[in-house]
Image: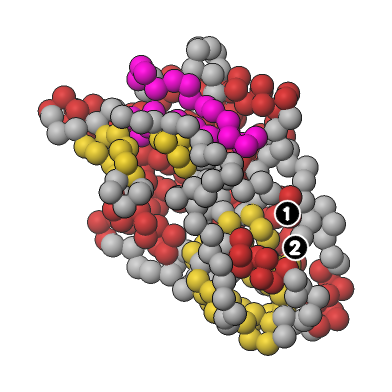
Amino acid sequence: MPTLWIKPPDEALFYADFDAVARKNLEGVFSSENPGSPFMQALAAIGLSLYGGDQPVLQWYRGKPYFNGTLMMKLVTGGAVVPEPSADGGYKQVFKFSWRHLIRLLGAQWKLMRYVAQPDEARDPLVQSIALGFVLQGLVFRLGQDAAKLASWISGAAPIPAQLKSIVAQIQSVQVRRTALSPVWQRLFPHKGNADAELETVEWFWDRPPADDARHPQQVENILPLQRQWQGMPASAGHVMGVLVVVLDLHDMPNLAALRAKWNAPLVLLFRRARPETVAFFTQADAALFAGGGVLSHACTVAREMNLPSVTALGDAFFEYFAGMSSNHVWLEVDATAGTVRLVER
């Protein structure tokens, strides 16, 4: 079967700028050949073992890292589940139904939960972060088909089924621990560019990256018509109506205090990506919007901790739509509980 390659789950890592030195450092972190690499130490800390035939762990596409998703799924399920292409152009999780695989699945899940329960503060932060990443994947796997509803649950937009509440609570707890460790990634692989300089890549692919000059079937552009309401993923519940501030460059931010005084209105900050650097501006915002980024990203996790209404995954076309009118006093109504954004007036 083909190997599934996926974007790294850590937003700080994916949006870093990788020169030759940083690339070599990352390959060292995720080396499967060096028993002393942080990746191999994380597996040892949990008690997991690599499966043959799935190396390398890491490969590059358009200057960005991708991880062996097939291997990751095998690790958190004891090899009982593997991804395979589905008829709709996506991928599906295929279970291997046998007593041997069931025992491996239960064993891998038990090891992941045991790691969460044991104190680990003395271990290297990189090792802790990688290990908790495996734990997070294992917990999301336990949600099954309901994993698609996770964004609504953790943002408070929808009630969590009683039988899944403990799993969702564990996911949130693990992500908070990972968020506290994320500075170690930022120090190793800092982002130096601005918000408009992001290099778009596909979410995942099989074996070989798609050609740069071809449209990839898994990356469909969302071309926005003239409209007044958009749908994203709720990241932190709440409702705000305020003036939009489009952040084009994180290193050249407008004076938010002056804008608030000038307009005498709440400020809705729009970022292209839910990168860790964005949290520095949350104290001056009344709501935060992200064109791209996962609900378990560092920025979205911090937004929930701060009770800052936030919506993510609004799309690059959404960002571009408003970037051209950012100086025209645009008012938005943000219903972060439902994940909707509505244009009120210009």
Looking at the image, residue 166 sits to the left or right of residue 257; the answer is: left
Is residue 233 in view? yes
Q: Nearer the viewer, residue 178 or 11?
A: 11
Residue 123 lies, in percent from the top left, at 55, 24
Residue of label 1: 195
Snapshot colouring: secondary structure
Residue 42 lies, in percent from the top left, at 48, 24
Q: Which of 280 and 31 is in front in this view?
A: 31
**Crowd tier of the residue under label 2, counting other residues whose Cα lies within 10 Å: few below 14, some 14–19, many 20 or above:** many
User: Which residue: 85% across, 57% down?
Assistant: 252
- Quarter where residue 85 is shown: top left
Vertical position of residue 291 compared to residue 266: above or below:
above
Residue 274 lies, in percent from the top left, at 62, 54
Q: Which of 126 and 19 is in front in this view?
A: 19
Query: Nearer the N terminus, badge 1 or badge 2?
Result: 1
Q: Distance between the residues labelled 1 and 2?
A: 7 Å
Mark 2 element type: loop
**Crowd tier of the residue under label 1, counting other residues whose Cα lies within 10 Å: few below 14, some 14–19, many 20 or above:** some
Instruction: Identify the amino acid type marked 1.
Output: Ala
User: Which residue: 66% across, 71% down?
Assistant: 321
User: Which residue: 81% across, 75% down?
Assistant: 327
Mark 1 element type: helix
- Quarter where residue 52 is shown: top left
Q: Which of 37 and 231 is in front in this view?
A: 231
Vertical position of residue 53 compared to residue 296: above or below:
above
User: Which residue: 73% across, 55% down?
Assistant: 196
Instruction: Identify the amino acid type marked 2.
Output: Val
Please report the bounds of the magenta region as a residue range. Answer: 51-74
Residue 111 lies, in percent from the top left, at 33, 29
Residue of label 2: 247
Please say whether residue 110 is one of the residues in the magenta stretch: no
Looking at the image, residue 50 sits to the left or right of residue 257; the answer is: left
